């Protein structure tokens, strides 16, 4: 880890920061809602790619697994200092970036982490809120 990454990560998880809240517990996707507030099944094509267990480590790395514990992705994460967005940078096993996803945070506290995704970024009237709650599910070993 470079000194630049290390210092950025240390600042990112300052006690009481939104990043510290996200890193404080493993998260499980437990619900999803559409832009009208209606429940969306977790198996629905519009939300199923966001479902699983997420482990945000204080060192700025993350791992995600499907609900059957199969590996989903891993890489780096951050939360903006104002707590309004979360960024993940998914990487392959060689450490090369595969994709980057920035989402709006709707709720981030000790009881819930909800972020918003837009199927069409040009149309913010249609969105899905992906709701996570803390879990005691142990992080699988890949």
Image (tube, rainbow, N blue to C red):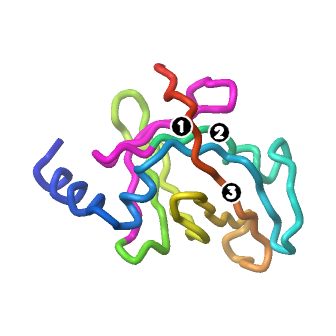
Q: What distance separates the C-alpha of mark 2 from that of mark 1?
A: 7 Å
Q: How crowded is mark 1: few (under 14 residues within 10 Å), some or many (20 or more)?
A: many
Q: How crowded is mark 3: few (under 14 residues within 10 Å), some or many (20 or more)?
A: many
* Residue beneath the point at 70% across and 67% down: 118
Magenta span has 39?
no
The image's mark for residue 52 is 2
x, y percent for residue 34:
82, 66
Q: What distance separates the C-alpha of mark 1 from that of mark 3?
A: 15 Å
Which circle's residue, 1 or 3, is located before the other in the chain?
1
Q: Start and end of the magenta stretch?
A: 56-80
Which circle's residue, 3 or 2, is located before the other in the chain?
2
Instruction: Find numbered disc 3 in the image and state the secondary structure of the residue it sits on.
Output: strand
- Relative horizontal placement of residue 72, taking residue 31 as reference (left or right): left
* Residue beneath the point at 52% across and 28% down: 138
* Mark 3, residue position: 131
Against 142, is 65 above or below? below
CB atoms of marks 1 and 3 within 8 Å: no
Count of picture labels = 3
* Mark 1, residue position: 64
Instruction: Find numbered disc 1 in the image and state the secondary structure of the residue it sits on.
Output: strand
Q: Residues within 10 Å of mark 2 (few under 14, many from 20)?
A: many
- Relative horizontal placement of residue 99, taking residue 70 as reference (left or right): left
The image's mark for residue 10 is none
* Residue beneath the point at 86% across and 55% down: 40
x, y percent for residue 101:
52, 57
CB atoms of marks 2 and 1 within 8 Å: yes
Mark nearer the viewer, 1 or 3: 3
* Residue beneath the point at 37% across and 43% down: 57
x, y percent for residue 72:
58, 33
Locate residue 20: give its quadrant: bottom left
């Amino acid at each position: 880890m470079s000194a630049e990454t290390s210092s950025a990560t240390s600042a990112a998880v300052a006690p009481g920061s939104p990043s510290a809240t996200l890193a404080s517990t493993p998260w499980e996707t437990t619900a999803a809602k559409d832009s009208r507030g209606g429940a969306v099944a977790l198996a629905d094509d519009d939300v199923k790619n966001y479902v699983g267990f997420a482990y945000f480590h204080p060192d700025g790395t993350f791992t995600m697994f499907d609900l059957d514990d199969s590996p989903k992705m891993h890489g780096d994460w951050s939360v903006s200092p104002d707590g309004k967005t979360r960024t993940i940078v998914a990487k392959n096993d060689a450490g090369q970036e595969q994709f980057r996803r920035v989402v709006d945070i709707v709720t981030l506290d000790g009881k819930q982490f909800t972020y918003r995704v837009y199927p069409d970024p040009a149309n913010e009237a249609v969105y899905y809120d992906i709701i996570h709650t803390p879990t005691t599910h142990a992080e699988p070993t890949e």
